[in-house]
Amino acid sequence: RGSMLRGVAVGGSVKRQADDGRELAYSSEARITWNNCKCKQSWGGCNNSCCNPDGDLNEWCMVEDANCEDSDWGFCKPPGSDPQTCQDSPPRWIDAEQDTCATYGMLGYCTKDGDYGSGWHKSWGTFSDYANQGHSATSACCACGGGLDIASKCRDKDWVDSDGDTCATYSEASWCDHLGSYGFGWHEEWGTFANMSNKGMTAPDACCACGGGDYSTNPTRPQ
């Protein structure tokens, strides 16, 4: 397989600049990509495995084994990430300072209960001060108690793709998002979901994590 283009510009934020020490300490830990491939500790100008030198939606790394990733780079998987039983919504939301849900989770800005995390500074104000697209982190981000709960509302169809990969793999490797778009783990060199179709279906048809599957009701926001 091969990832979506790195591309939406994300500027530095006041919050991030104020917390550089914490971010560097965090980034020194061993990291892997969404495809569970080990990141190189040092590459280019990055000495902390995962960096964001060109202002992408998420940190990324050069990998130690290109055969594992099927590419020489991949987006970094946040530590402690669970399979996509919850989806950030709006997908790929950013706050008013262009910080992503991944940033809120990785740097401890919030807790899964929707409270302020150890990485948040009182001097920054409240989550609502950084609201964007009608949402703050607590309504948009799974890491902060928001997002859409898809686990109890949807059942994957009996399906594997033409390579034998299951809906669970699409979810765990973040190959898709709940609107049927490509996720952080998908590489553009792999082609399209249609290239991997089987039984007349693609992942966005068959898999809950990709916007398909069989829903008993519409997805809801966690209570």
Image: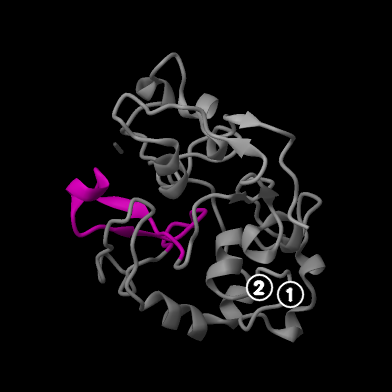
Name the residue: 27% across, 64% down. Answer: 44
Give the amino acid type for the residue marked by disc 1 in the picture.
Asp
Mark 1 residue crowding within 10 angstroms, few (<14) / some (14–19) / many (20+): some
Q: How many marks?
A: 2
Quarter placement of the N terminus: top left
Vertical arrangement, residue 51 with respect to residue 140, above or below: below
Q: Which mark is residue 115?
A: 1
Mark 2 residue crowding within 10 angstroms, few (<14) / some (14–19) / many (20+): some
Q: Is 70 included in the stretch rendered in magenta? A: yes
Vertical arrangement, residue 8 with respect to residue 25, above or below: above
x and y percentages locating residue 82 in the rendered image:
50, 58
Report how far apart the C-alphas of labels 1 and 2 lie in the structure: 5 Å
**Numbered disc 1: secondary structure:** loop
Left or right: 206, with 211 as reference point: left
Give the amino acid type for the residue marked by disc 2 in the picture.
Thr
- Identify the residue position indicated by label 2 in the image: 111
Left or right: 218, with 212 as reference point: right
Residue 51 in sight: yes
**Numbered disc 2: secondary structure:** loop
Name the residue: 32% across, 69% down. Answer: 49
x and y percentages locating residue 159 in the rendered image:
43, 26
Vertical arrangement, residue 16 with respect to residue 160, above or below: below
**What range is drawn magenta here?**
52-78
Name the residue: 59% across, 33% down. Answer: 211
Q: Which is the main secondary structure of the residues drawn in magenta?
A: loop
Left or right: 169, with 135 as reference point: left
| Cβ atoms at labels 1 and 2 below 8 Å apart | yes
